Amino acid sequence: MAERGIAEADVETALRQRIGDPLPGQSGTIVVQGYAAGGRILKVCVRTTDPGYVVTMYWVRPGGA
C-alpha cells in the first residue's frame, strides 16, 4: 500500500463508496471500484470467499482504467 501511496483509510472508503457492481478478477477474486479521499477512484481486489481480505489495490488513472 505504501509503495502505491494508498492509505488504509482510502481502501476502507472505496469499499464503502462503491461504483457499480464488482467485476470478476483472477483466481477466486473480485475487483471493487470505489471513491477514496478527494474523489479519486481506487480499484480493490478482494477474495470471493473472504471479502475482507484485500489481495491488491491500485488507483485508476484519470481518463483510463
Image (cartoon, helix red, strand yellow):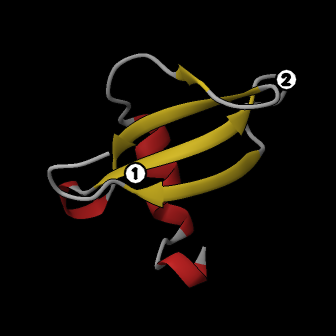
Q: Which residue is mark 2?
A: 49
Instruction: Tell me which numbered mark, 2 or 1, is placed earlier along the sequence.
Output: 1
Identify the residue shown where x is 58% and y is 83%. Answer: 3
Identify the residue shown where x is 48% and y is 58%. Answer: 58
**In the image, is residue 59 above or below residue 50?**
below
Q: Which residue is mark 1?
A: 42
Q: Secondary structure at mark 1?
A: strand
Outermost bottom residue: 3
Quadrant in which the N terminus is drawn: bottom right
**In the image, is residue 19 above or below residue 53?**
above
Residue 14, image quadrant: top left
Q: Measure how far apart labels 2 and 1 are at the Cα level.
A: 21 Å
Quadrant in which the C terminus is drawn: top left
Q: Residues within 10 Å of mark 1 (few under 14, many from 20)?
A: many
Where is residue 11? Give x, y as percent: 51, 54
Tell me which amino acid carries mark 2: Thr
Question: Horizontal placement of 8 versus 63: left or right?
Answer: right
